[in-house]
Image (spheres, rainbow, N blue to C red):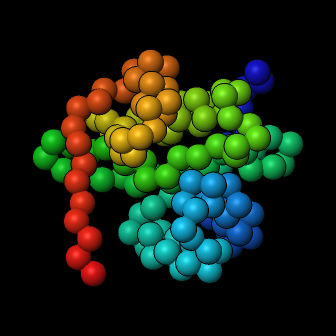
Amino acid sequence: MADLNQDIRELTEQADFIEAFPVMNQLRTDLTEESYLALLSKMRKNGYKLFALRVDEKIISLIGVILQVNFYNKDHVFIYDFVTDSEYRSKGYGYHLLCYIEEWAISQNAAYVTLESAMQRTDAHRFYEEKLSYDKWCFSFRKYIK
């Protein structure tokens, strides 16, 4: 596979966000384009960044991250969204995008890259642990209150 880093960049324009929606919608199936754009606007104000890997000018994979700091992860990059178009999975695109984000995190002086993954996504967990050496070290909990 060719060096894909040259095809990875942060999305910053409305047209790019709209172009990215069909891929993001494969992960966040409950979103409409309208709700996606509204939430994205709020998230970007809080520091959220959306990166895309393109092949032949087409968005193949997306990763949404934020720089954060806390007592247990110190300065870190948290991955909120990570998806590769279903037609292009298992071809190394996601791996290259995650490696890019790890290098970006280093450039931001982050100590860790962290993410959450739904419990049933065992194939994804194997990918993170075996291919990328991520540690599975905690559970994440939430409670619906509204």
Give the camera-side residue of 50 and 93: 93
Residue extending farthest top: 130
Q: Quadrant of residue 100?
A: top right
Q: 108 above or below 43?
A: above
Image quarter where the N terminus lies is top right
Residue at left offset 48%, top offset 69%: 44
Q: Is residue 25 visible?
A: yes
Residue at left offset 51%, top offset 58%: 49
Residue extending farthest right: 56
Residue at left offset 26%, top offset 45%: 75
Looking at the picture, how far across and down is residue 146, in whole percent?
A: 27, 81
Q: Is residue 87 left or right of residue 75?
A: right
Q: 53 above or below 46?
A: above
Give the camera-side residue of 69 and 136: 136
Residue extending farthest left: 71
Looking at the picture, how far across and down is residue 30, in whole percent?
A: 54, 68
Q: Is residue 40 left or right of residue 53?
A: left
Q: Is residue 16 visible?
A: no
Looking at the picture, how far across and down is residue 15, in whole percent?
A: 74, 70
